[in-house]
């Protein structure tokens, strides 16, 4: 297999050498969507998909990209070229381990060491992957079907997610005997208890940590999912695809892929949300002024927030969508709740002041 110096990752993705991270991401999504084996049935589609994934894994990481550029330029400080490790299944990473791993550069200077292996057995459920899909109001109303290419942690192919190639069961930690902690005699400070460094407090260890995933049971890979957004969807609605989120560690359950619908026509801008908050803030003072006949005294607390709020709302344009007005109502309600407490303090102050005016201080009458 060609080494990193023989591959032009920029050409593979079809971007310029000074391309931004966003341009690289978009180029990867476009090519991966066309070359994914589930979509493209060409004989070389899978190999090209792996090559595109490898290129993206390097160029999307600022540190890896810097080292790659240095190696391509022939810099003597680049650290040498790395080939694909055995057993990588074609997803070889020139920086060591899996192409989406973190490589050997964090483990000291020099040699091409493998990714750090951990014997700790730490099964944890995978987190959801949240993706925001922007649609116009018409598309959201009719419903759409979209393919999404993204990165996620998936179960390691080499160990099938267990973290160990040879054994599917964890072992009791030999260092702490399963307690999860050890005691250390520090001499002057006496005996201290600390977390076991081998099992990291779990009391169990992976029998033989997998070299591909470092014992975690999962690797970062490129995936694609087809999302069906139902008709009548609105801004903020979510569509879940079960099991297509991040895989759990050491064989635990995977999270979901969560597609969050974004409809700009129904969404308040940040300025508009603040504007409606200002308008809502003024309402308790308006009610207080009318109820206590002190509206003139509270006029600034009403006029200024309303004027400022109206400017912020109108500046970004009024929408005629029902959901937009519903969101506006929620923002106004939030503003009312913020202004209500302050208005109550004002009401208490007016009550005390009027009481003093009728009876005087400490019950002694005023004589005018």
Image (spheres, helix red, strand yellow):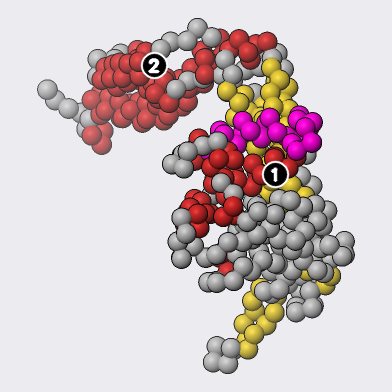
The reply, left or right, for residue 315 in relation to residue 198 is left
User: Is 117 located above or below residue 17 in the figure?
Assistant: below
Image: magenta residue range: 24-45
User: Is 7 located above or below residue 324 in the figure?
Assistant: below
Residue at x 82%, y 57% (from the top left corner): 159
Query: Which mark is on residue 50?
Result: 1
User: Is 100 located above or below residue 76 in the figure?
Assistant: above
The image position of residue 170, as x and y in percent, is 84, 66
Query: Which mark is on residue 316?
Result: 2
The reply, left or right, for residue 173 in relation to residue 291 is right
The image position of residue 213, as x and y in percent, is 72, 58
Tally the marks.
2
Task: Indicate the secondary structure of the residue bearing disc 1.
Answer: helix
Residue at x 61%, y 61% (from the top left corner): 82
Tell me the crowding category of disc 1: few under 14, some 14 to 19, or many 20 or more residues within 10 angstroms, Cα based.
many
User: Is 68 located above or below residue 222 in the figure?
Assistant: below
């Amino acid at each position: 297999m060609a080494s990193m110096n023989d591959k032009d990752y920029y050409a593979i993705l079809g971007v310029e050498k000074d391309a931004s991270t966003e341009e690289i991401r978009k180029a990867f999504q476009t090519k991966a969507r066309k070359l994914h084996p589930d979509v493209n049935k060409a004989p070389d589609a899978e190999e090209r998909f792996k090559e595109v994934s490898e290129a993206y894994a390097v160029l999307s990481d600022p540190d890896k990209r810097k080292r790659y550029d240095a190696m391509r330029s022939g810099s003597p400080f680049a650290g040498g070229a790395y080939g694909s490790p055995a057993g990588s299944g074609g997803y070889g990473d020139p920086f060591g381990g899996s192409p989406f791993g973190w490589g050997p550069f964090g483990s000291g200077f020099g040699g091409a060491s493998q990714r750090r292996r951990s014997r700790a057995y730490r099964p944890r459920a995978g987190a959801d992957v949240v993706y925001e899909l922007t649609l116009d109001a018409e598309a959201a109303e009719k419903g759409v079907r979209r393919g999404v290419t993204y990165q996620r942690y998936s179960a390691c192919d080499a160990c099938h997610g267990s973290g160990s190639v040879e054994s599917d069961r964890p072992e009791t930690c030999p260092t702490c005997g399963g307690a999860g902690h050890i005691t250390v005699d520090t001499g002057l400070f006496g005996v201290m208890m600390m977390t076991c460094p081998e099992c990291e407090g779990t009391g169990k260890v992976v029998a033989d940590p997998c070299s591909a995933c470092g014992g975690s049971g999962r690797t970062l890979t490129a995936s694609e999912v087809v999302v069906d957004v139902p008709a009548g969807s609105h801004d903020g609605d979510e569509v879940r695809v079960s099991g297509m989120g991040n895989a759990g560690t050491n064989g635990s359950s995977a999270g979901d892929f969560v597609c969050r619908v974004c409809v700009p026509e129904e969404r308040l801008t940040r300025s508009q949300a603040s504007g409606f908050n200002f308008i809502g803030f003024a309402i308790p003072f308006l009610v207080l002024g009318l109820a206590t006949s002190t509206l003139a005294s509270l006029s600034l607390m009403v006029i200024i927030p309303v004027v400022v709020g109206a400017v912020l709302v109108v500046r970004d344009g009024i929408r005629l969508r029902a959901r937009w007005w519903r969101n506006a109502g929620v923002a106004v309600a939030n503003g009312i709740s913020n202004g209500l407490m302050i208005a109550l303090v004002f009401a208490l102050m007016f009550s005390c002041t009027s009481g003093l005016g009728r009876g005087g201080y400490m019950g002694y009458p005023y004589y005018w």
